[in-house]
Image (cartoon, helix red, strand yellow):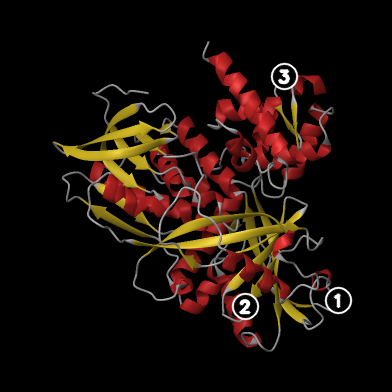
Amino acid sequence: MQLPSDEVFDILVIGGGINGTGIARDAAGRGFSVCLCEANGLGSGTSSASSKLIHGGLRYLEHYEFRLVREALKEREILLSMAPHIIKPMRFVLPHSKSMRPAWLLRLGLFLYDHLGGLKYLQKSRRINLNHDDAGAPLKPAFHWGFEYSDCWVDDTRLVLLNAIDANDRGATLFTHTKVESARCEEGIWEIKSRNRITDEIVTQKARVIVNAAGPWVDQVLGEAFGLKNPKNVRLVRGSHIIVEQLFEHGKPYIFQNADERIIFAIPYLNDYTVIGTTDADQTRMTDSPKMSDDELQYLCDAANEYFTKQITRDDVIWSYAGVRSLYNDGSGEAKKVTRDYVLKNDETSGAPLINVFGGKITTYRRLAESVVERIEKILGRRGEAWTSTSSLPGGNFAVGDLSLIINDLKNNFPFVNDSIITRLSTSYGTKAAKVLENAKSAGDLGEHFGGGLYQKEVEYLVQNEWAINAEDILFRCTRIGVGKSNEISEKVESFLATMFAENTR
């Protein structure tokens, strides 16, 4: 798409991850004209490769990052109320033995965790007897006592997509698979040239302010698009996860303390699986598809085997994923000690305002976005009040705990749809789930079944409303249906999309 040469956006955001889409949404909601460019698919980078938690970061207390923990804990409840369809409270189990951090220290940490951010929807922590609690059954006999506390799980990529959808609904222009190649200042205005990586078409935009929210590519963008020599603002740290067949059925995730003082999680995933992670490994070079190393895989297996009775090996791993966190380069030594807080820096050395976003975590994305827009207001003037803390994301306009009402309505209105599909649609789309099934009067109206409960009607909805263009978008980002499935479903979806797009271009 070639924009008119006289069109000047207030803001151009580089990066379509959680920070970029959050910034675009906030700014568009205040009345700024916004353009966003993402080099790949929305949420295709680090934002889709997290531990999928909205949490305060219990272990950050050990590094005295009280401000970060307090802000994250406050955001945890705000985000839960914004998107109760894709975010759900969970009770985390922390087994304890004498060889670990002392019990008094854990009790103190959990007391602070309960009180730093306040609790509205979530329960306080408590000590549990693992000999009598269901959570103790999968664990080795050595673990008799533990603690239980609250945090939240999130469908991370859908969180990105919902921010993008709302930004678009509020007037933002979003370009996917569009890489910013150059940004030059002309008389105080940025002129940006981007390339569509699918059509090879050059897109030209103008903007008053650029926000570089490219995540682990932030320095790469500064070097390639802005011409900076060898920028080293971030440290790239890879976090990897493995997925195995379900290790426990009670539904409570675990947080484990390792001998090296790292923390890993074992979290129920998609009803049938357990996801185990994460690692902290330095990433020397940024690629579109970072890979977990053999050492990381073995590390996660060994860490889980320290706790679970059922032992796992690399042969039990059915899927894995790795994401690269762009941590602000504060000169710390070990990767696990580098701050997870975000840093914002203004740069006007090129003649026009550039705001760089370094670091950050998914839990604090909304507050980060608010901070960025506050900086933009100091440059362009105020357009509207801060608004996102009391908003809801698309499909999330219902009370926390009322998801069952959405599910029951769908069952009544679409009795021919399988209950498991109804539940998945409700937890993905919330009050907008009925739009996915709109005008369907029978099972035949759902169209072709690709497998795993994915029907043609949903695929068409994702293409029309959520920027999906290929099977990876549909099976691993817009939904998680592809996890643990054969390539056959992917081949069917790709074949259908090829036909669909060919017919649309006739």
Going by the picture, which residue comes out furthest to the left?
187
- The disc, 3 or 1, on the residue closer to the chain's N-terminal end is 1
Which residue sits at x=44%, y=30%?
A: 198
Residue 109 picture location, percent across and down: 58, 78
Which residue sits at x=55%, y=73%?
A: 59
Tell me the SS state at disc 2.
Answer: loop
The quarter of the image holding the N terminus is top left
Residue 413 picture location, percent across and down: 79, 27
| Crowd band around label 2 with a 10 angstrom C-alpha radius: few (<14), some (14–19), many (20+) | some
Q: Marks 3 and 2, Cα distance to the nearest angstrom?
A: 53 Å
Residue kind at label 1, given as amino acid type: His
Going by the image, does 327 lie left or right of 323?
Answer: left
Going by the image, does 367 lie left or right of 105?
Answer: left
- Residue 361 visible? The answer is no
Q: Nearer the viewer, mark 1 or mark 2?
A: 2
Tell me the SS state at disc 1.
Answer: loop
The quadrant in which residue 23 appears is: top left
